[in-house]
Amino acid sequence: MPSITRRRAAKVGRPTSAEADILAATQRLLIAGASFTELGVQQISAEAGVARSTFYSHFRDKIDLLVRLATELMSSTFDITSAWTPADGPDRLTDVFAEVVGVYREHAAVRRALAEVAAYDATVRAFWARELAPFTDFTIRLLRAEQEAGRVPADLDPVSAARVIVTGGERALVDHVTGADPGHDAAFARELALTWWHGVYRRPSWHDA
């Protein structure tokens, strides 16, 4: 196996900073199979080509580093999903999920590290709950607006439904990108979109079902 400690060439016209080098190096190590818990600051610094003291000038500790990596994942995902509204329909929702799957695939190693650390670190668990909250709040607002417009049954509970589709959808995404072949990404995105569409956004009233 070729050494993963060799630094990648900087992109032309895009100067890199030590902070960006450390983030990229950590992601490379995780992709290569390293356990985040077992990764040391010295190993991360060596992979990034910076001094250990430089690491601590940009990050308080490894948890701060992991949070920064995960924030990039979730901010990208929220930008994609929040651009969709039910008026765009299920086909566009399928496209949205295809984009989200791509982001999750790119950051799958980081998401695995989050799950690893959240098992024993309350700070990371609380961070992840905060990161999912905007998705849940956004979905609640969408569902309430659809109810007011008469397109979602009045007997739907927006809060419970939002929690189910956001938390359940995120876990399904993680399971998919960490265990399924990329060749199934399009089918997964379509099934997730149609499940949300028919199960929540356009489901019949319980009394009519």
Image (cartoon, grey):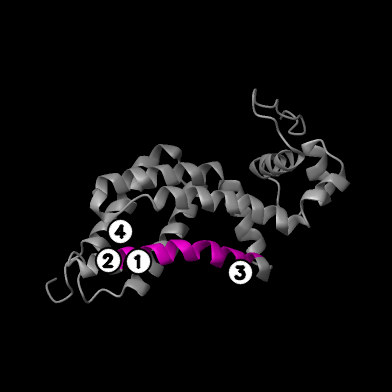
Q: Reply yes or no: does residue 153 show up in magenta.
A: no
- What crowding class fits label 2: few (fewer than 14 Cα within 10 Å), some (14-19), or many (20 or more)? some
Task: Compute the Cα span from label 2 to label 4.
Answer: 16 Å
- What crowding class fits label 3: few (fewer than 14 Cα within 10 Å), some (14-19), or many (20 or more)? few
- Mark 1, residue position: 141
- Tell me the magenta residue range: 124-143
Question: Mark 3 or 1, which is nearer the eye?
Answer: 1
Q: Position of residue 180 (x, y in %)?
A: 46, 45
Q: Going from the N terminus, do you reach mark 4 or mark 1 first?
A: 1
Task: Compute the Cα span from label 1 to label 2.
Answer: 6 Å
Q: Going from the N terminus, do you reach mark 3 or mark 4 first?
A: 3
- Mark 3, residue position: 126
Q: Going from the N terminus, do you reach mark 3 or mark 1 first?
A: 3
Mark 2 secondary-structure assignment: helix
Q: In which image quadrant can residue 122 be found? A: bottom right
Task: Compute the Cα span from label 3 to label 4.
Answer: 26 Å
Q: Is residue 37 something that shows in the picture?
A: no
Task: Compute the Cα span from label 4 to label 1.
Answer: 15 Å
Q: Residue shown at 29%/57% (left/top)? A: 195
Q: Residue shown at 29%/69% (left/top)? A: 144
Screen quadrant of the C terminus: bottom left
Task: Compute the Cα span from label 3 to label 1.
Answer: 23 Å
Q: Is residue 137 above or below residue 15?
A: below
- Mark 2, residue position: 145
Question: Mark 4 or 1, which is nearer the eye?
Answer: 1
Q: Is residue 68 found left or right of 152 in the rendered image?
A: right
